[in-house]
Amino acid sequence: MEIIKCKRRYLVFPLTIVVFLTAFTSCLESKPAAESSPVVPEEIIPGTEQEKLEENLTKSSDGDEEYQTDISPQVDIPPDYTLLTTINVNLDFDQTEEQILVFKKRETPDSTIKIAVVDFDTVRNLYKISWQGETRATNIRTFNITLEDLVGDHNLEIICSGTNKMGDRTLNIFRKTHAPSGINIYYTSICEIVSSGTIEIQEKERSQAYKLGQKNGISFPIVTYSHDPDSENIMDLIKTTYYWQYQQEEYVKGVEEKIPGKEIEEVQLQELFQKGPEAFEKFLDGPWYSSSSEEDTAPGKSTEILLFESKKRSITFYSENVQEVYDWSSSHRTRIPNSLYINTRNELVPFIEKQISIYILSLDSILVSVYDNELKKRESPWDGKYFKLSPSLRKNFQKATSEIKNPENINLTGHYTSEDNIEIYFNFPWFRMIEKNQVIRGGYSIYNVREPIIELKIMGEDGLIKGIKRFKLEFSEDKIENKIVRTCVLVPGSLVIDGFKPNGDSPLRFMQIEILEGEDPIGSTSSSEKEARSSLKES
């Protein structure tokens, strides 16, 4: 469950309660105090785990009272509502505790989350709902409820934070007030904020007299940060501060302040430069594209893409004709504050290594220098300035690469021949191709980019990679009488952001015939099968 981070120092009556999602059913009728038997849970809300409820989450400042969420409600709720949590807390400092119920309409994901206060009626000797309120939050997984004295009058406000169906942050604050009937506890809304950015309650130090209960304290302002709609720079923000007004008995919007993105960027970069290699790796995560010049930063004209995946410990080099995957061996900070040094090994051919120096120029640009031990020189075609992909292009790129994995139903092994008498032998991870008495050797890998792709890395006698070819792989396997016929069609092309793109050259069609043992009417193995076995041993 996500909790809004507020800049808080808890002073008096702080109470933060994590909402555990447990469903109950019944109806919203009063229940005598003597009949407060536990309600048996019927179901668990989909997508949540039934966790053990924590006891004694927080104590009040004098340590005499304990607040719990592992108790049953004192009233029933209607069957078309789901009870999310029940909280026991003394809201008016009398001899009996009240309850706060958090509930939501069943089978209606977009419905808002509601809360209710259950108070004890000493005249009728039963519990009943004295007040109900509605929040702007809809997501039960991000919903959080907190009790704290925001106003400074020694009473606890009910603070509800979460997100709505659009993903915006929501904040609802309810303050205790006089009930219309004159009895029981009653609340009224004093703040309702929906923000596409962040919402913070900024706590301030209160006087010793407040802590001793002798005087009221200062109220806490509420601050939101959101994107400046008048600016094209996504880093430019608007800071809005809301202040408590006693006369109006609500929080009122006050100062709006524009914060240039440059200032924010400088602060964030300085914080990053003081951290270790793990923070740098997290910063680099995702695709970065290079441009032919610093002035031309259009993603459509980029020639190379670097994909950093720190969790997978992988770095992938993409260009029009090349895709190389390297294991991310290690990262080291250098004496230069904005730099990171990375060691990598080729995933397919481990003795091929690259050393990468990264220099962070801004929040969306880096300078890359690659030492290629394969080429034995500092200059590399991957050197240059790289920029973060825009959100839309990043989404397309991630969609195209999210399915890169080994297809489970394709297992190339053994000897294949084509109609043009081209032979190819597969013995993972190596291949050997014979065409017109010319032998080509190297490594191969098969993965999915929306469709099966086979990549052949051609190696010279010195063990260095001389070239890379990619094909769309069309594989089929059929059983015909006592034979298994495997067909392998290789369509030449290259990988682009949107997937595989054929280059127009004629496909290569290979075939392998396997004679099933015991089913050969002659009782012998075909010559092609013998050749395949001997060739595999040689390779």
Image (spheres, rainbow, N blue to C red):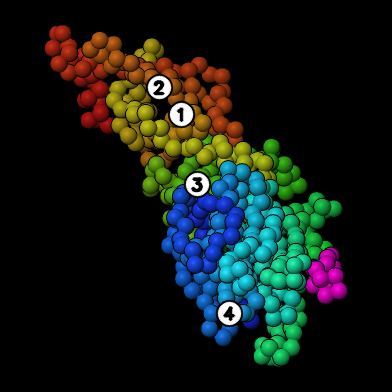
For label 3, the SS is loop
Which label sits on residue 475?
Answer: 2
Q: Tell me the quarter of the image containing the C terminus.
A: top left
Residue 66 drawn in magenta: no
Q: Earlier in the sequence, mark 3 or mark 2?
A: 3
* Image: magenta residue range: 244-257
Query: Residue type at mark 3?
Result: Pro
Q: Earlier in the sequence, mark 4 or mark 3?
A: 3
Q: Which residue is mark 1?
A: 452
Nearer to us of marks 4 and 1 is 4
Nearer to us of marks 3 and 2 is 3
Q: CA distance from mark 1 to mark 2?
A: 9 Å
Q: Report if residue 302 is visible in the image.
A: yes
Q: Tell me the quarter of the image containing the N terminus.
A: bottom right
Q: Which residue is mark 3?
A: 46
- Dominant SS of magenta comes to strand
> 13 and 523: which one is in front?
13
- Bin the neighbour count of mark 1 within 10 Å (Cα to Cα): few under 14, some 14-19, many 20 and up: many
Query: Residue type at mark 4?
Result: Gln
